[in-house]
Amino acid sequence: MADNITNDSTRRLVSKKQTLDDAYAAPANFLEIDVVNPITHGVGNKRYTDYEVRMRTNLPVFKVKESSVRRRYSDFEWLRNELERDSKIVVPPLPGKALKRQLPFRGDDGIYEEEFIEDRRKGLEVFINKIAGHPLAQNEKCLHMFIQEPVIDKNYVPGKIRNT
Amino acid sequence: MSFFGFGQSADIDIQLDGAETRKMAEMKTEDGKKERYYLYYDGESVSGKVNISLKKSGSRLEHQGVKIEFVGQIELYYDRGNHHEFTSLVKELARPGELSHNASFEFEFNQVEKPYESYAGTNVRLRYFLRVTIVRRLSDITREMDLLVHTLSSYPEMNNSIKMEVGIEDCLHIEFEYNKSKYHLKDVIVGKIYFLLVRIKIKHMEIAIIKRETTGSGPNTFNENETIAKYEIMDGAPVRGESIPIRVFLAGYDLTPTMRDINKKFSVRYYLNLVLVDEEERRYFKQQEITLWRKGERLRRPLQQQLMAQQIQQVPASQSKFPQSHPQGQPPELVSEIEEQQHPIAPQIPPNATAAPEPPSPQQSQSPMHEEAPEPLPSATVTSNTTYHATATTTPQPPPQLEPPDEDIDTPKLPSPPTEPPNSIDSPEEEFLEAQAGSPSEEEEEEEEERESAVKTSTQEPVPVAQ
């Protein structure tokens, strides 16, 4: 037999009406991180490429609401290692280290090829976005230093931003 | 094979009394096929006739006795040799002798106790059956006939809504509410999710019904999780103050009543799993147990009269078994379905937030998620059909008209579905945090495998707000 249910028995529960302020306010989850402007510094054998890591946010966990720092690939590796050791998150993979490209006798410019740098830039952007939005990673000092400090102090004391 | 009553010399056939009018119900067999069996309730007598026909007319069948047994047993699939019989009755049909022609024997098991519901699960089966045995020197001839038993409950007196504020420190706070904690199998779950703080980028939200079958104990405990239903209830990013309604119709799903520690051998429990997924495919979930119970259905007259004619005995309901029903002649004639429709099952009115026990503020909680125990609602004496526009402190509404006719002394009240023991559900670590990649309740999803940012839940630390 069909089990007819009355309107009342499936009626929505009462909820607090949302205020217009809440409805139209800026979202509380605003966080944008871009990895842009790759620049290769130096000449010949002593070159290295770094990228601008630009963040805009309104999350209270970040002390600075806008930041722009320059980071190189090894800085990203440092961040990954710190998080793997100290945090409980599963750290996303970095784009490849491209060791083959660093070998001599290549026909192209190795790791300074434009196309390669662009691919790496994209991978780094995906990487940092995955991490920065992670509630647990947001608690790690290393992440904040990576995003907001001009220079990474590798002798810092690892730890959490907030402790109970 | 003599198991199926097809011995070389004789066939056994069991006929049940009142079979024409008796309800049947479906249950999965071991091979997964669905079959129909006759449906019996606790306290009903099981009676009928056993017909033995000799294969070769004119032959004689010597035997050491013919008997019929009524057996209720639990079979654990990993322990095949051992069947745990919790009920076993036997009646002798014929003393040792000789059958020279086809014979019929009547039998009656009077007002048999059937304390548990029949269940066919992943690792365990509970079944009832009649078994006729013609005992012989070398090999017995037997025939089994499975019966299905349903256990019924009546509307619980206390059926508080489930309302909790959970979240992750400084990232996501929600308040979820389900209108009841005990639902019958054709009920509707009405609820809502209210967002208090949203600092993560939510992509969508879904709700699932999870069935967990637990067998064994201690180190040999097996938990089998099965997702009975799952669907998306919200697409997009909510902000603070938004309320998302939930409505889940249970009648469409293959559900059994909640079974707790049946004969100390197994349990079957149901959970609502609320999952939020963010832009990076991270999953945040909150599992909440609900109690399911089986409501009695309207009976057809002839059977009802037959059952009412039988004596009714009272047996105290023990809270340790679920759901214990009285061995009575009559499954409850609850109000007919038509009448039920006229009585709204008023959604539980949530207690005023300030009256609730102090929701632990983020700074003070021991764990990142708070779990606010559903407040015991004040005793329900209100019977008016006030709608939910009443003030929040109104007492909750039991649906009074839906109770079995209390005035009818021939229909003793069934036990209510029991309240689950407190703290029996999730350990703090499981409360509302990201699902691990290998989370058993979501094994079938490919996203789980691809997700990279699973959290090791056991060591998640609480995070007080930075001052």
Image: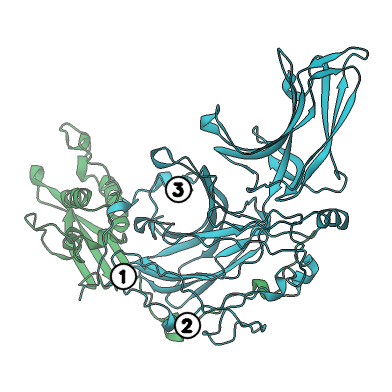
Chain colours: A green, B cyan
User: Which residue sits at x=91%, y=19%?
Assistant: B101
Find numbered disc 3 in the image and state the secondary structure of the residue it sits on.
helix
**Residue A98 versus residue B159 in the image, above or below:** above
Task: Give how far across and how far down residue B276 sits, in percent.
Answer: 45, 61
Residue contact between numbered discs 1 and 3, judged by CB atoms under 8 Å: no
Front-most of residues B234 and A30: B234
Q: Is residue A146 visible from the viewing direction of this image?
A: yes
Find numbered disc 2 in the image and state the secondary structure of the residue it sits on.
loop
Answer few, some or many: residues within 10 Å of disc 2's Cα (few below 14, many 20 plus, some between 14 and 19).
Answer: few
Residue contact between numbered discs 2 and 3, judged by CB atoms under 8 Å: no
Residue positioned most to the right: B58
Q: Which mark is residue B170?
A: 1
Residue at the spot of label 3: B447
User: Which residue sits at x=67%, y=52%?
Assistant: B151
Q: Is residue B257 left or right of residue B23?
A: left
Q: Earlier in the sequence, mark 2 or mark 3?
A: 2
The amino acid beneath tag 1 is Asp
Which quarter of the figure has residue B153? bottom right
Task: Give how far across and how far down residue B20 sits, in percent.
Answer: 88, 45
Q: Chain of mark 2?
A: B
Residue at the spot of label 2: B352
Find numbered disc 1 in the image and state the secondary structure of the residue it sits on.
loop
Q: Is residue A109 visible from the viewing direction of this image?
A: no
